[in-house]
Image (tube, helix red, strand yellow):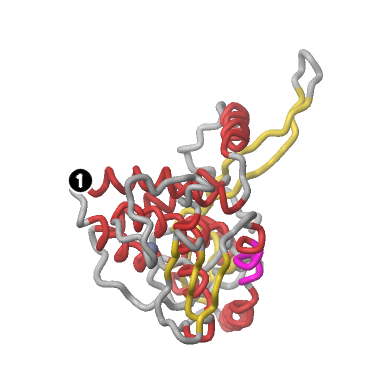
């Protein structure tokens, strides 16, 4: 799954959550889900599996659960996860080989949707403790995104100011020090938000047309939508804990100031995508041509039909 597809899925999820989004909630840590084979679900699969209501972070396909002494209960609904399978294909006429991409779908169940024998229960407990240990190991990716933002503004980690803001004139970000946040994911989400604002600076993507260049946060709903969506996108790339409900509540707050808010969210998502790519140092035109190749390569694959087979995760 490439960046554009990740961005599109996150935007869709946020829009879907707008209806039910309540008030702005505290961010908390949702550990990465793991398969019965001990592989961690990442990226979009993690996002999808993190929004379900189960306490257990252990998942498996019907077969995986069965071979671990479990039985999925009747009537339980599966969640679909996706996996890109790469291969090499040779053109019979020309002999030219090319790389192929197949999008595979797998149906997985949470361990709480199944009954396990004693051995199975032990295995689930082992996997769950692996997940709990892993939680704090994951912020290297977030750090490397910040380090990799070429020509980034100065960032102040403040002990005095409890606000997070981007000041366009000084081209400066100020955020409360990491120790003041409930989780480090929350800290990076806020910092990503401010980084996305900074991409609008005239010397970068020059997005602040018609906005005042005052110190402090940029007081415009549309710019807030861009920054918050961009922050969600970068959090998705960094595999941070995704609390979509939180972002949806925040975005709903700003979007309600705008009429026809779905349209504005799509508008902002396009700009947020450019901001995230800018920070990641991705040339959008290159990404677009790569996407085309991938679409061509998969054109004969009926991607909407789930492929039911056991998962390699
Ligand atoms: Zn802001």
* Residue sitting at the far left: 259
Residue drawn at x 57%, y 53% is: 279
Q: Residue at x 61, y 45 (%)?
A: 282
| Residue most extreme to the top | 93
In the depicted structure, whether residue 121 falls above or below residue 291: below
Which residue is label 1 attached to?
Answer: 260
- In reply to whether residue 27 is colored magenta, the answer given is no
Say few, some or many: other residues with alpha carbon within 10 Å of mark 1 (under 14 / 14 to 19 / 20 or more): few
> Which residue is rendered at x = 55% and y = 27% of the image?
299
Q: Quadrant of residue 142?
A: bottom right
Q: Nearer the viewer, residue 138 or 313?
A: 138
Q: Position of residue 149 (x, y in %)?
A: 62, 57
Q: Quadrant of residue 41?
A: bottom right
Residue 141 included in the magenta stretch of the image? yes
Q: Position of residue 45 (x, y in %)?
A: 52, 57
Q: Helix or strand or loop: what does disc 1 sit on? A: loop
**Closest to the observer: 89 or 169?**
169
Q: Quadrant of the C terminus?
A: bottom right
Residue 89, percent across and down? 74, 29
Query: Is residue 92 in view from this perspective?
Result: yes
Q: Is residue 297 left or right of residue 203?
A: right
Give whichever of 189, 20 is nearer the camera: 189
Image location of residue 189, percent across then percent down: 48, 68
Q: Is residue 74 visible?
A: no
Q: Magenta: predominant secondary structure element?
A: helix
- Name the residue located 34 percent from the left edge and 66 percent from the top edge: 245
Magenta stretch, residue numbers: 139-144
Quick check: which quadrant has ligand 1? bottom left
Please identify the quarter of the rendering in which residue 35 is found. bottom right
């Amino acid at each position: 799954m490439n960046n554009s597809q990740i961005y599109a899925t996150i935007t869709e999820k946020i829009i879907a959550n707008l209806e039910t989004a309540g008030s702005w909630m505290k961010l908390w840590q949702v550990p990465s889900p793991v398969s019965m084979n001990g592989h961690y679900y990442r990226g979009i699969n993690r996002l999808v599996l993190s929004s379900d209501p189960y306490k257990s972070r252990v998942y498996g396909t019907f077969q995986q659960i069965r071979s671990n002494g479990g039985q999925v209960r009747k009537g339980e609904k599966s969640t679909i996860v996706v996996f890109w399978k790469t291969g090499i294909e040779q053109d019979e006429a020309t002999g030219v080989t090319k790389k192929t991409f197949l999008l595979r779908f797998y149906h997985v169940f949470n361990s709480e949707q199944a009954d396990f024998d004693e051995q199975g229960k032990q295995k689930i407990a082992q996997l769950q403790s692996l997940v709990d240990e892993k939680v704090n190991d994951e912020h290297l990716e977030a750090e490397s995104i910040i380090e990799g933002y070429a020509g980034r503004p100065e960032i102040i980690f403040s002990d005095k100011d409890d606000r997070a803001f981007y000041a366009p004139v000084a081209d400066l970000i100020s955020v409360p020090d990491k120790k003041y946040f409930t989780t480090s994911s929350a800290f990076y989400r806020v910092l990503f938000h401010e980084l996305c604002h900074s991409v609008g600076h005239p010397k970068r993507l020059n997005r602040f047309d018609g906005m005042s260049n005052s110190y402090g946060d940029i007081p415009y709903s549309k710019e807030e939508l861009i920054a918050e969506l961009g922050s969600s996108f970068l959090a998705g790339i960094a595999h941070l804990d995704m609390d979509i409900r939180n972002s949806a509540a925040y975005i709903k707050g700003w979007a309600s100031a705008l009429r026809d808010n779905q349209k504005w969210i799509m508008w902002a998502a396009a700009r947020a995508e450019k901001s995230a790519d800018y920070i990641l140092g991705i040339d959008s035109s290159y990404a677009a041509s790569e996407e085309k190749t991938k679409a061509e390569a998969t054109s004969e694959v009926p991607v909407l039909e789930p492929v039911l087979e056991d998962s390699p995760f």
